[in-house]
Amino acid sequence: MNIHILTVLPELLESPLNHSIMKRAQEKGLLQVEIFNLRKWAVNEYGQIDDYQYGGGAGMIMMCEPLSKAINELNNQHQYEEIIYTTPDGDLFDQKEANTLSLKKNLLIICGHYKGIDQRIRDHYITKEISIGNYVLSGGELAAAIITDAIGRLIPGVLNNETSALFDSFQDDLLAPPVYTRPADFNGWQVPEILLCGNQNKIDEWRHEQSVNRTQLKRPELLKEN
Ligand code: 6GU
Protein backbone atom coordinates (compact mmCIF):
# COMPACT_ATOMS: atom_id res chain seq x y z
CA MET A 1 0.00 0.00 0.00
CA ASN A 2 1.23 3.49 -0.83
CA ILE A 3 0.44 6.42 1.42
CA HIS A 4 1.77 9.67 0.00
CA ILE A 5 1.68 12.83 2.06
CA LEU A 6 1.92 16.36 0.67
CA THR A 7 3.05 18.92 3.25
CA VAL A 8 4.95 22.15 3.88
CA LEU A 9 6.54 20.59 6.98
CA PRO A 10 7.99 17.18 6.03
CA GLU A 11 10.15 17.19 9.19
CA LEU A 12 7.06 16.90 11.36
CA LEU A 13 6.13 13.59 9.73
CA GLU A 14 9.45 11.82 9.52
CA SER A 15 9.91 10.71 13.12
CA PRO A 16 6.37 9.46 13.88
CA LEU A 17 6.28 7.31 10.75
CA ASN A 18 9.75 5.77 11.07
CA HIS A 19 9.54 3.90 14.34
CA SER A 20 7.95 0.82 15.82
CA ILE A 21 5.13 -0.73 13.80
CA MET A 22 5.21 1.87 11.00
CA LYS A 23 8.92 1.21 10.54
CA ARG A 24 8.39 -2.54 10.44
CA ALA A 25 5.52 -2.23 7.97
CA GLN A 26 7.78 -0.32 5.60
CA GLU A 27 10.73 -2.69 6.09
CA LYS A 28 8.45 -5.62 5.27
CA GLY A 29 7.43 -3.84 2.05
CA LEU A 30 3.77 -3.82 3.07
CA LEU A 31 3.54 -0.03 3.38
CA GLN A 32 5.36 2.65 1.45
CA VAL A 33 5.06 6.09 2.99
CA GLU A 34 6.41 8.93 0.86
CA ILE A 35 6.47 12.52 1.96
CA PHE A 36 6.45 15.31 -0.63
CA ASN A 37 7.37 18.91 0.13
CA LEU A 38 4.81 21.25 -1.40
CA ARG A 39 7.53 23.92 -1.81
CA LYS A 40 8.79 21.91 -4.76
CA TRP A 41 5.76 23.31 -6.59
CA ALA A 42 6.06 26.88 -5.21
CA VAL A 43 4.97 29.77 -7.44
CA ASN A 44 8.29 31.63 -7.24
CA GLU A 45 11.93 31.38 -6.22
CA TYR A 46 11.05 32.40 -2.64
CA GLY A 47 9.14 29.17 -2.19
CA GLN A 48 5.78 30.92 -1.92
CA ILE A 49 2.81 28.56 -1.54
CA ASP A 50 0.39 30.75 0.41
CA ASP A 51 -1.23 34.17 0.09
CA TYR A 52 -3.66 36.56 1.79
CA GLN A 53 -7.32 35.73 1.64
CA TYR A 54 -9.89 37.46 -0.53
CA GLY A 55 -12.36 39.39 1.56
CA GLY A 56 -9.76 40.10 4.21
CA GLY A 57 -9.07 38.37 7.49
CA ALA A 58 -6.11 37.09 9.44
CA GLY A 59 -4.01 34.20 8.27
CA MET A 60 -2.66 32.88 5.01
CA ILE A 61 -4.36 30.48 2.59
CA MET A 62 -2.55 27.75 0.68
CA MET A 63 -2.72 28.73 -3.01
CA CYS A 64 -4.34 26.77 -5.85
CA GLU A 65 -1.39 26.63 -8.20
CA PRO A 66 1.19 24.73 -6.13
CA LEU A 67 -1.43 22.30 -4.86
CA SER A 68 -2.91 21.76 -8.30
CA LYS A 69 0.49 21.16 -9.90
CA ALA A 70 1.57 18.81 -7.13
CA ILE A 71 -1.65 16.82 -7.15
CA ASN A 72 -1.70 16.51 -10.95
CA GLU A 73 1.89 15.37 -11.10
CA LEU A 74 1.55 12.83 -8.29
CA ASN A 75 -1.84 11.59 -9.40
CA ASN A 76 -0.60 10.93 -12.94
CA GLN A 77 2.00 8.61 -11.49
CA HIS A 78 -0.12 6.85 -8.90
CA GLN A 79 -3.85 7.06 -9.64
CA TYR A 80 -4.96 7.66 -6.06
CA GLU A 81 -8.17 6.03 -4.89
CA GLU A 82 -8.67 8.83 -2.38
CA ILE A 83 -7.21 12.30 -2.13
CA ILE A 84 -7.62 13.16 1.52
CA TYR A 85 -7.47 16.61 3.07
CA THR A 86 -6.80 16.91 6.82
CA THR A 87 -8.88 19.69 8.30
CA PRO A 88 -10.73 20.37 11.57
CA ASP A 89 -13.99 20.73 9.60
CA GLY A 90 -13.67 17.28 7.99
CA ASP A 91 -15.54 14.07 8.86
CA LEU A 92 -14.48 12.65 12.22
CA PHE A 93 -11.92 9.86 11.75
CA ASP A 94 -12.78 6.56 13.42
CA GLN A 95 -11.85 2.88 13.35
CA LYS A 96 -14.41 2.13 10.66
CA GLU A 97 -12.82 4.69 8.35
CA ALA A 98 -9.36 3.30 9.17
CA ASN A 99 -10.58 -0.19 8.22
CA THR A 100 -12.02 1.06 4.93
CA LEU A 101 -8.89 3.00 4.00
CA SER A 102 -6.60 0.07 4.89
CA LEU A 103 -8.09 -1.82 1.92
CA LYS A 104 -6.90 0.81 -0.60
CA LYS A 105 -3.69 0.62 -2.60
CA ASN A 106 -2.86 4.29 -3.22
CA LEU A 107 -3.75 7.20 -0.97
CA LEU A 108 -2.68 10.84 -1.06
CA ILE A 109 -3.02 12.91 2.10
CA ILE A 110 -2.79 16.68 1.83
CA CYS A 111 -1.92 18.45 5.05
CA GLY A 112 -3.78 21.68 5.67
CA HIS A 113 -1.82 24.57 7.08
CA TYR A 114 -2.25 28.20 8.08
CA LYS A 115 -5.91 29.03 7.53
CA GLY A 116 -6.38 26.11 5.15
CA ILE A 117 -6.35 25.56 1.41
CA ASP A 118 -8.21 27.45 -1.32
CA GLN A 119 -11.78 26.11 -1.48
CA ARG A 120 -11.44 25.42 -5.22
CA ILE A 121 -8.87 22.69 -4.50
CA ARG A 122 -11.31 21.12 -2.04
CA ASP A 123 -14.09 21.31 -4.64
CA HIS A 124 -12.13 19.88 -7.55
CA TYR A 125 -9.54 17.45 -6.19
CA ILE A 126 -10.32 16.34 -2.65
CA THR A 127 -12.35 13.13 -2.34
CA LYS A 128 -12.36 12.90 1.46
CA GLU A 129 -11.99 15.45 4.25
CA ILE A 130 -10.89 14.11 7.62
CA SER A 131 -10.69 15.62 11.11
CA ILE A 132 -9.15 13.63 13.96
CA GLY A 133 -11.12 15.30 16.75
CA ASN A 134 -12.96 18.34 17.97
CA TYR A 135 -9.99 20.59 18.62
CA VAL A 136 -7.74 22.65 16.37
CA LEU A 137 -4.15 21.70 15.55
CA SER A 138 -1.66 24.14 14.08
CA GLY A 139 -1.34 21.96 10.98
CA GLY A 140 -2.59 18.74 9.45
CA GLU A 141 0.76 16.91 9.73
CA LEU A 142 0.17 15.28 13.09
CA ALA A 143 -3.31 14.31 11.94
CA ALA A 144 -1.81 12.75 8.78
CA ALA A 145 0.64 10.80 10.94
CA ILE A 146 -2.20 9.54 13.12
CA ILE A 147 -4.31 8.54 10.12
CA THR A 148 -1.34 6.77 8.51
CA ASP A 149 -0.55 4.89 11.72
CA ALA A 150 -4.16 3.81 12.23
CA ILE A 151 -4.39 2.57 8.63
CA GLY A 152 -0.91 1.08 8.35
CA ARG A 153 -1.21 -1.27 11.32
CA LEU A 154 -4.35 -2.79 9.79
CA ILE A 155 -2.61 -3.93 6.60
CA PRO A 156 -2.50 -7.75 6.73
CA GLY A 157 0.92 -8.97 7.84
CA VAL A 158 1.95 -5.72 9.55
CA LEU A 159 1.21 -6.88 13.08
CA ASN A 160 3.09 -9.99 14.21
CA ASN A 161 0.04 -11.61 15.65
CA GLU A 162 -2.51 -10.82 12.99
CA THR A 163 -5.42 -11.43 15.27
CA SER A 164 -4.29 -8.76 17.67
CA ALA A 165 -5.81 -5.86 15.72
CA LEU A 166 -9.12 -7.67 15.87
CA PHE A 167 -9.20 -7.29 19.64
CA ASP A 168 -8.32 -3.60 19.71
CA SER A 169 -10.61 -1.13 21.35
CA PHE A 170 -13.29 0.01 18.85
CA GLN A 171 -12.79 -2.89 16.45
CA ASP A 172 -16.16 -4.28 17.56
CA ASP A 173 -17.43 -1.02 19.04
CA LEU A 174 -16.18 -2.12 22.45
CA LEU A 175 -13.30 -0.75 24.48
CA ALA A 176 -10.51 -3.20 25.26
CA PRO A 177 -10.61 -4.97 28.66
CA PRO A 178 -8.06 -4.18 31.41
CA VAL A 179 -4.69 -5.89 30.94
CA TYR A 180 -2.02 -7.04 33.39
CA THR A 181 1.51 -8.43 33.35
CA ARG A 182 3.91 -9.84 35.95
CA PRO A 183 4.10 -9.77 38.90
CA ALA A 184 0.72 -11.12 40.01
CA ASP A 185 1.14 -9.20 43.28
CA PHE A 186 2.63 -5.71 43.17
CA ASN A 187 2.63 -3.82 46.46
CA GLY A 188 -0.27 -6.03 47.48
CA TRP A 189 -2.25 -5.02 44.35
CA GLN A 190 -3.50 -8.28 42.87
CA VAL A 191 -4.09 -9.32 39.29
CA PRO A 192 -7.70 -10.58 38.95
CA GLU A 193 -7.57 -14.25 39.87
CA ILE A 194 -9.52 -15.40 36.84
CA LEU A 195 -6.59 -14.43 34.56
CA LEU A 196 -4.42 -16.94 36.40
CA CYS A 197 -6.92 -19.82 36.31
CA GLY A 198 -5.79 -21.30 32.98
CA ASN A 199 -9.33 -21.78 31.64
CA GLN A 200 -9.29 -19.84 28.35
CA ASN A 201 -13.07 -19.91 27.86
CA LYS A 202 -13.64 -18.41 31.29
CA ILE A 203 -10.95 -15.82 30.67
CA ASP A 204 -12.47 -14.84 27.29
CA GLU A 205 -15.88 -14.55 28.90
CA TRP A 206 -14.52 -12.36 31.69
CA ARG A 207 -12.68 -10.14 29.21
CA HIS A 208 -15.80 -9.66 27.13
CA GLU A 209 -17.79 -8.78 30.24
CA GLN A 210 -15.11 -6.24 31.26
CA SER A 211 -15.17 -4.75 27.76
CA VAL A 212 -18.92 -4.28 27.86
CA ASN A 213 -18.81 -2.80 31.38
CA ARG A 214 -15.99 -0.45 30.50
CA THR A 215 -17.76 0.68 27.34
CA GLN A 216 -21.02 1.20 29.24
CA LEU A 217 -19.20 3.28 31.82
CA LYS A 218 -16.85 5.35 29.65
CA ARG A 219 -18.36 5.43 26.15
CA PRO A 220 -22.04 4.39 26.33
CA GLU A 221 -22.68 5.99 22.94
CA LEU A 222 -20.64 3.20 21.30
CA LEU A 223 -23.16 0.62 22.53
CA LYS A 224 -26.13 2.68 21.36
CA GLU A 225 -24.76 2.94 17.83
CA ASN A 226 -25.46 -0.76 17.19
CL1 6GU B 1 -7.06 16.94 10.47
N1 6GU B 1 -6.19 19.36 11.11
C1 6GU B 1 -6.09 20.40 11.94
N2 6GU B 1 -5.35 21.45 11.59
N3 6GU B 1 -6.69 20.45 13.11
C2 6GU B 1 -7.41 19.39 13.46
C3 6GU B 1 -7.56 18.26 12.64
C4 6GU B 1 -6.92 18.28 11.46
N4 6GU B 1 -8.36 17.38 13.24
C5 6GU B 1 -8.68 17.94 14.39
N5 6GU B 1 -8.13 19.14 14.52
Image (cartoon, rainbow, N blue to C red):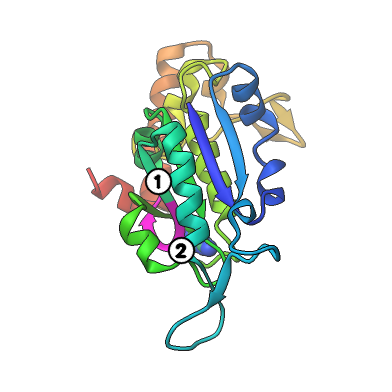
- Relative to 47, does residue 162 appear above or below in the rendering? above
The residue drawn where x is 73% and y is 35% is 188
Alpha-carbon neighbours of circle 1 within 10 Å: few (<14), some, or many (≥20)?
many
Quarter of the figure with residue 160: top right
Disc marking residue 64: 2
Q: CA distance from mark 2 to mark 1?
A: 15 Å
| Left-right relation of 81 to 18 | left
Region rendered in magenta: 85-94
- Relative to 209, does residue 40 appear above or below in the rendering? below
* Secondary structure beneath label 2: helix
* Residue 88 shown in magenta: yes
- Relative to 10, does residue 196 appear above or below in the rendering? above
Q: Position of residue 72 (x, y in %)?
A: 43, 46
Are the residues tagged 2 and 1 within 8 Å (C-beta)? no
User: Is any part of residue 226 visible from this angle?
Assistant: yes
Q: How many marks?
A: 2
What amino acid is at disc 1?
Ile
